Amino acid sequence: MSSMITLALSKGRIFDETLPLLAAAGIQVLEDPEKSRKLILSTNQPNVRVVLVRATDVPTYVEYGGADIGVTGKDTLIEHGGQGLYQPLDLQIAKCRVSVAVRSDFDYAQAVKKGSRLQVATKYTSIARDFFATKGVHVDMVKLYGSMELAPLIGLADAIVDLVSTGNTLRANHLIEVERIMDISSHLVVNQAALKLKQAPLRRIIDAFASAVPPEKN
Ligand code: AMP
């Protein structure tokens, strides 16, 4: 008897960039998530299936065993906390950075002098809090779930902490990236109990992914 392996992915960049890694493990997803509303996708391997979840929910599904394995951004992993997750591999995909951005007419250097206060809008409250704490800046945090770029334009916050890839979204909204907090890429996460109970099939996938990850460019 072979046990089922469930892989949690989010639609979009993570799904698309995980496909070549799956191919390296001999796994082909049989349905296109952009063309179907199905949340459980079968693969060419009868004992491997893919579940589609919100990007921020991937660590939660894997933590509670709703999925055995998943692919998630380092940003999401930090905000989740990573408890209960084995993190064997940086997949070097879906790369971007977490940065601080402000309106071009905002004096950021003055605003982050030690002991000052800054209103920050972000969905990355943990990352933002840690970052400004090390600078000795007090933060009034406004938690948002999207369209962070709007906040400084409307006067809801002085600064945002958000993912930046090309910088096009910031430019389109007349915001400037004033500090890079950290580089982000997606990681493989594995449920720790599953790793023991389904060791052989999970190891096969982890090893195949590892062999397909491009060497780190510095
Ligand atoms: P860009 O305009 O290329 O700098 O992309 C910025 C927008 O895309 C922001 O709204 C980000 O939240 C989002 N974004 C950029 N990179 C990623 C990524 N790797 N994963 C998820 N969202 C991203």
Image (cartoon, rainbow, N blue to C red):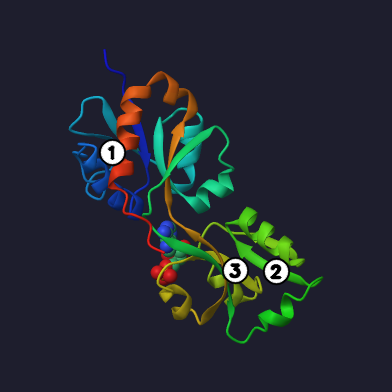
Q: Residues within 10 Å of mark 1 (few under 14, many from 20)?
A: some
Residue under pointer 1: 208
**Foreground residue among 25 and 43:** 25
Which dot, 1 or 3, sits closer to the camera? 1
User: Which image quadrant for residue 67?
Assistant: top left
Label ID, residue 119: 2
> Nearer the N terminus, badge 3 or badge 2?
2
Tag 1's secondary structure?
Answer: helix
> Nearer the N terminus, badge 1 or badge 3?
3
Q: For disc 2, does the CB lie below 8 Å from ligand 1?
A: no
> Nearer the N terminus, badge 2 or badge 1?
2
- Circles 3 and 2 in contact, beta carbons < 8 Å: no
Residue 109 lies, with reference to residue 186, above or below; the image says below
Question: In x, y percent, where is residue 10?
Answer: 37, 46
Q: CA distance from mark 1 to mark 3?
A: 38 Å
Amino acid at dot 2: Gln
Residue under pointer 3: 160
Q: Residues within 10 Å of mark 2 (few under 14, many from 20)?
A: some
- Residue at left 54%, top 72%? 150
**Foreground residue among 139 and 212:** 212
Q: Quadrant of the C terminus?
A: bottom left
Question: In x, y percent, where is residue 55?
Answer: 44, 48
Q: Residue furthest right?
A: 115
Q: For disc 3, does the CB lie below 8 Å from ligand 1?
A: no
Residue 6 lies, with reference to residue 112, above or below; the image says above
Amino acid at dot 1: Ala
User: Which image quadrant for residue 141?
Assistant: bottom right
Which dot, 2 or 1, sits closer to the camera? 1
Tag 2's secondary structure?
Answer: strand
**Foreground residue among 124 and 134:** 134
